[in-house]
Every structure is written in structure tokens, then in C-alpha cells.
Amino acid sequence: MPSNHDHTHDHDHTHAHDPSHDDMHTHDPAQPAWKHDGVCVIAGGNLDSNTAQTPGMDRRAAINFARVGAKKLWAGTVTIHADAKTGAHHHGHLESVIYVIRGRARMRWGDQLEFTAEAGPGDFIYVPPYVPHQEINASATELLECVLCRSDGEAVAVNLDIEPVEKPDTVLWIDPTHPQGGV
């Protein structure tokens, strides 16, 4: 019995979405557009560090408009080195959700970062819009690794000039182009 499924257009969607890609296919009006561009998988080793940064942490984008065409959310990872603290910042009108994968997160927030709470693996942290906050790796020996989601495709990070309760440590910039000990 012949199959009604056309295999000629099936392809792997492990690539980053290019919005101009939509014009590369001539879609049959009888076929929904999502048959070709419905799901994108972004490999964990293919995250983008070209995003708003705050001293003391490394943010990497997985899902945003530029990569997949997302208009209403941003998702990625954040890593804070052992015993490191970020500078005070907020994310404008965006809501943020942080999911702790590994390590222990200490969050400080408030006008003088006077409030505190801690979260560990499996815990979720919600940060409302415009709330001044600071992320702290509460471990002196283990990386703090988290997944981060925001309520818009924008990468907003407004660094604040307020005196935090726990002052940020100097954190070396470590990535493929700045090896350990580099600046």
C-alpha cells in the first residue's frame, strides 16, 4: 500500500533557524509551513555568548529571535564560577525564570540588595520586572549552572551602580579566546 507521506522534504532541524530560510522553500499551499520549519533543536554545545552580559557570569543564548525567530521569549544558560558574585542589575520590563541545574544559588534583591534566598538543583527562581538583584554562587568549589528563560525575545540586562551587600569578586574571563588567567 503506498504511503501518503512525502519523504522528499524531510530534513534534520538541528540547525539554528534563519528567518530568511522561510523564502528558500516553495511551500505547497496544501502543506502547512510547520512541516518544514516547525521545530528547531539547538545543541547544548552551540549556544551563543553574543548576548547582554553582567560581570561575574556567562550568559549564552539558545532561543531568541535571531536564532529561531522567537518573538515572545528568550532562553539560554547562565554559569557563575565557584565563589563568584555578579554585579547588581535588573532586566527591565522582562520577567525571568531561573532553573538551577548544578550548584547552589544565593539571590540578593532590593534597592540595596538587602533581601536573600537560596536555591539548589531542581529549584526554580522567579525574578519580576525591574527588580534589582545579584546572583551569587554560594559554593567555594563548584560551578553554578542554570537554565534561564525570559518573557521576551530581547536580551535586556541593565547593570546598576549600587553598593551590594555582598560585593562582586573579580572573576577572570574564561572562554576559548581568553584561556585561564587571561583578561
Image: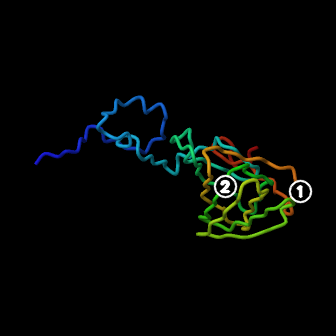
Q: Is residue 79 left or right of residue 2?
A: right
User: What residue appears at the point 62 percent right and 64 percent down from the top-left corner?
Assistant: 100
Residue 84, picture quadrant: bottom right
* Front in this rendered view, residue 45 or 125: 125
The structure's colour scheme is: rainbow
Q: Position of residue 54 (x, y in %)?
A: 74, 49
Residue type beneath disc 2:
Glu
Secondary structure category for the residue under label 2 = loop
Give the vertical position of 72 relative to 23 (above or below).
below
User: What residue appears at the point 62 percent right and 56 percent down from the top-left corner?
Assistant: 148
User: What residue appears at the point 62 percent right and 66 percent down from the top-left corner?
Assistant: 124
**Residue occupying the far right of the picture:** 163
Q: Earlier in the sequence, mark 2 or mark 1?
A: 2
User: What residue appears at the point 79 percent right and 62 percent down from the top-left corner?
Assistant: 109
Q: Are the residues flagged by discs 2 and 1 in contact, CB closer than 8 Å? A: no
2 vs 1, front mark: 2
* Front in this rendered view, residue 179 or 146: 146
Give the vertical position of 89 relative to 70 (above or below).
below
Q: Position of residue 30 (x, y in %)?
A: 29, 37
Mark linked to residue 179: none
Q: Is residue 113 left or right of residue 145?
A: right
Crowding near the residue tagged with mark 2, few <14, some 14–19, many ≥20 C-alpha atoms within 10 Å: some
* Front in this rendered view, residue 47 or 177: 47
* Measured Cα–Cα span from mark 2 to mark 1: 23 Å
